[in-house]
């Protein structure tokens, strides 16, 4: 059974994307700083007949992200798909954002993504196959001055996808991001739409791979 690892399994995009892959027969591994918060979601997945597990991760602690990758591979074998969906969403301007929270925000928004990609890509590149999916956002293209750290973080995520796309594609690994250009609530049509965009990126034949799609188009 193939494994889908979700880093940042929130009730919106994270849960919807995990379920989209579960429908295709993937084992989904949901994560949270407090796994007990995932109990209801795991029960819902299990009732639907999906294979689901949960693990602890703190995206603000880069060592925790590395540990998650190692533990998941040790328990389930290869990680076939990584979905990085963690984000710190402080509302602050350049005038109001304290330096310490800016650094901690960027640790979650881009530092944890970098570590997750570094660690999971080793096995993928060795096998010559795998998919790395990153949740992007329109603030990464058009920065919002009221969300300075999130805007910079999403720009970093987007550049990570584009920077790796060509070299990883040549080695059989698809790195891609969905540029989410709308508000997404839990259990909403938008959440399902983003999840479908991620699935389409993953399922596309290699000749049609792309580094980014925008939702809504």
Image (tube, rainbow, N blue to C red):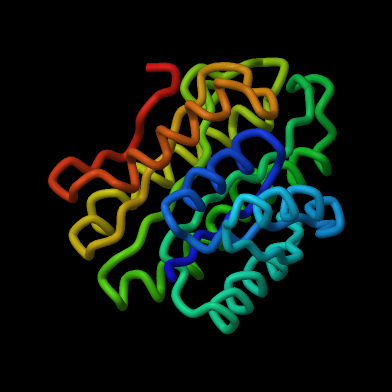
In the figure, 104 relative to 118: above or below?
above
* 115 over 6 or under it: above or below: below
Residue at position x 81%, y 28% from top? Answer: 97
In the picture, residue 57 is in which quadrant? bottom right
Give the x, y percent position of residue 60. 75, 54
Residue at 35 percent of width and 34 percent of height:
212
| In the foreground, 97 or 125 | 125
Furthest-bottom residue in this view: 74
Horizontal arrangement in the rendering, residue 57 relative to residue 170 (left or right)? right
Residue 96's spot in the image, x, y percent? 84, 22
How many numbered dots are placed on residues in this image? 0
Q: Residue at x 67, y 15 (%)?
A: 145
Using the rendered view, name the quadrant where residue 5 is placed: bottom right
Residue drawn at (29%, 76%) of the image: 127
Q: Quadrant of the N terminus?
A: bottom left
Above or below 108: residue 119: below
Residue 208 at x, y = what percent?
17, 41
Residue ranking furthest to the left = 207
Q: Is residue 51 left or right of residue 36?
A: left
| Image quadrant assignment for residue 161 | top left
The foreground one among 36 and 119 is 36
Give whichever of 163, 175 is nearer the camera.
175
Q: Measured from the top left, where is residue 217 in percent x and y?
A: 37, 17
């Amino acid at each position: 059974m193939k494994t889908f690892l979700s880093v940042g399994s929130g009730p919106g995009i994270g849960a919807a994307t995990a379920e989209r892959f579960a429908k295709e027969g993937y084992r989904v591994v949901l994560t949270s700083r407090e796994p007990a918060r995932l109990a209801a979601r795991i029960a819902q997945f299990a009732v639907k007949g999906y294979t689901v597990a949960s693990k602890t991760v703190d995206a603000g602690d880069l060592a925790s992200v590395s540990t998650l990758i190692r533990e998941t591979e040790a328990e389930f074998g290869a990680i076939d798909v990584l979905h990085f969906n963690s984000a710190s969403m402080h509302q602050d301007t350049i005038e109001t954002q304290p330096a310490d929270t800016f650094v901690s925000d960027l640790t979650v928004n881009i530092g944890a993504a970098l570590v997750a990609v570094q660690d999971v890509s080793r096995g993928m590149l060795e096998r010559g196959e795998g998919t790395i999916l990153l949740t992007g956002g329109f603030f990464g293209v058009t920065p919002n001055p009221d969300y300075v750290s999130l805007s910079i973080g999403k720009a970093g995520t987007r550049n990570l996808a584009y920077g790796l796309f060509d070299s990883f594609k040549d080695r059989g690994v698809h790195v891609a991001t969905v540029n989410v250009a709308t508000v997404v609530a839990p259990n909403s049509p938008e959440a399902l739409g983003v999840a479908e965009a991620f699935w389409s990126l993953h399922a596309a034949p290699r000749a049609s791979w792309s580094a980014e799609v925008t939702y809504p188009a």
